[in-house]
Amino acid sequence: MKSPCLKYFNGNKAVTVSVDASKNRLGAVLLQEGQPVAYGSLEYVPGKNLVIADALSRAQSTTDNFDEVLGQEATVRINLLTQASPTKWEEIASLTAGDPEMQDVLLHIINGWPQKRKRK
């Protein structure tokens, strides 16, 4: 019997992200101790070929609390990636609150990204 290709993610181990890109595709793998724990790829598709996304963007939503539903979905997806302890989440929240760059990122996520990048 062969061992599985992907190893289980361990929140106590260091993580390495390895990414490679070409003109039309982006691939990434999440590694722990040199072993893959997750992977993914994206393929560039020109906007004119995105007929389903175009139709969906024009469709009227019947959900009044779209932001709340989206937030719940994002939380579920994050929790699927890692099962951190409540103490670890508190540590992440505390470190994020004390990091000026992360505060800028959070502001942009909530209020929208600026059209032009400000140079420091």
Image (cartoon, rainbow, N blue to C red):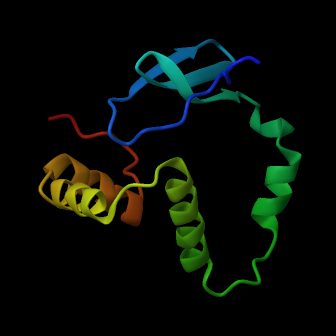
Q: Which residue lies furthest to the bottom in this view?
A: 64
93, 117: nearer the viewer: 93
Q: Which residue is drawn at 32% across and 29% down?
A: 14
Q: Which of 56 and 89 is in front in this view?
A: 89
Across and down, in percent, residue 31 comes to: 47, 23
Left or right for 33, reference 103: right
Looking at the image, residue 64 lies above or below residue 5: below
Q: Which residue is drawn at 71% across and 83% down?
A: 63
Can you name the residue that lies furthest to the front here? 1
Is residue 77 rendered to the left or right of residue 25? left
**Relative to 26, residue 52 above or below:** below
Q: In which quarter of the image is the C terminus?
A: top left
Residue 72 appears left or right of 86: right
x and y, in percent, of residue 57 in the image: 75, 61
Q: Position of residue 90 (x, y in %)?
A: 24, 63
Q: Is residue 41 above or below residue 61?
A: above
Q: Splitting the image into 4 quarters, where does residue 86 fall?
A: bottom left
Above or below for 92 versus 68: above
Residue pictured at 24% horizontal, 40% vertical? 118
Relative image position of residue 89 (x, y in whole percent): 30, 60
Q: From the viewer's perspective, tell me whether residue 38 is left or right of residue 34.
A: right
Q: In which quarter of the image is the N terminus?
A: top right
- Residue drawn at x 62%, y 12% is 22
Viewer-closest of 64 and 76: 76
